[in-house]
């Protein structure tokens, strides 16, 4: 397994030497809200929406007092917009009322905020606080399962734990980003770029299905 990991990680370094978070943000809460909004949509779409959102409502107080229907209109293109608009207002309210407008660092507190789960906290930790964490999103899950780093039925938590066990802690944030970007731009759900991929020889998905692509 170690050899397999080093082959994959070396290839990711070659392909994505400077991975970075593609969500735009300017402080703690703007990242937290952007990650929450990114569920079931693309970062590019979220960036368009957050530009309008944070221009119109430039601080947490303004978001807390925002007109709910206006928030729904702003986030409409992201899908699940009623829930997402509610989450924005509620996150702003809780942060202003209970935490002096500062995003708390404790996972137990963060995960009580509406729309914020383990994956979002992991992204926030790795990206904003630089606390080592591996967020498993749909891209990371797909890549790990195609490469058989985890069993096909592994849960996201099992995937996270497997990656944490096999990757050096100081690399968690960077490897998460590389896996996300690899899944987003190379190993896509539909029509992955298998012919050019140097992981073909160790890829379970390719061996089973990719050869006919
Ligand atoms: S061979 Fe295809 S399916 Fe396998 S990791 Fe590469 S791009 Fe993904």
Image: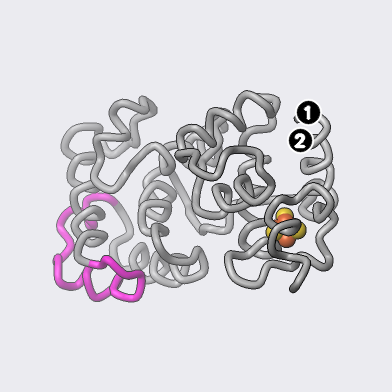
Q: Residue sitting at 33 percent across and 59 percent down?
A: 58
Q: Residue sitting at 75 percent across and 56 percent down?
A: 207
Q: In which quarter of the image is ligand 1?
A: bottom right
Residue topped by disc 2: 5
**Where is residue 142 shown, x and y percent of the image?**
57, 53
Q: What secondary structure is marked by label 1?
A: helix
Magenta region: 60-81
Which image quarter holds the C terminus? bottom right
Q: What secondary structure is marked by label 2?
A: helix
Q: In this view, does 162 lie to the left or right of 187?
A: left
Which image quarter holds the N terminus? top right
Snapshot quadrant of residue 109:
top left
**Where is residue 162 shown, x and y percent of the image?**
59, 30
Residue 140 part of the magenta segment:
no
Tags 2 and 1 touching, CB below 8 Å: yes
**Residue 2 bears which disc, if any?**
1
């Amino acid at each position: 397994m170690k050899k397999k990991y080093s082959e994959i990680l070396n290839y990711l370094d070659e392909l994505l030497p400077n991975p970075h978070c593609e969500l735009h943000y300017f402080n703690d809460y703007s990242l937290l809200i952007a990650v929450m909004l990114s569920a079931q949509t693309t970062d590019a779409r979220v960036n368009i929406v957050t530009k309008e959102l944070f221009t119109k409502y430039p601080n947490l107080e303004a978001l807390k007092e925002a007109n709910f229907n206006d928030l729904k209109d702003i986030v409409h293109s992201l899908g699940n917009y009623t829930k997402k608009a509610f989450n924005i207002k509620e996150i702003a309210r809780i942060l202003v009322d209970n935490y002096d407008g500062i995003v708390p660092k404790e996972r137990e507190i963060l995960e009580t905020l509406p729309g914020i789960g383990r994956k979002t906290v992991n992204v926030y930790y790795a990206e904003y606080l630089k606390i080592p964490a591996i967020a498993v999103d749909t891209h990371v899950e797909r890549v790990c399962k195609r490469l058989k780093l985890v069993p096909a039925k592994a849960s996201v938590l099992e995937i996270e734990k497997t990656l944490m066990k096999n990757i050096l802690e100081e690399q968690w944030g960077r490897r998460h980003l590389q896996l996300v970007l690899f899944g987003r731009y190379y190993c896509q759900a539909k029509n992955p770029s298998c012919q050019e991929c140097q992981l073909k020889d160790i890829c379970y998905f390719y061996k089973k299905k990719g050869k006919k692509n």
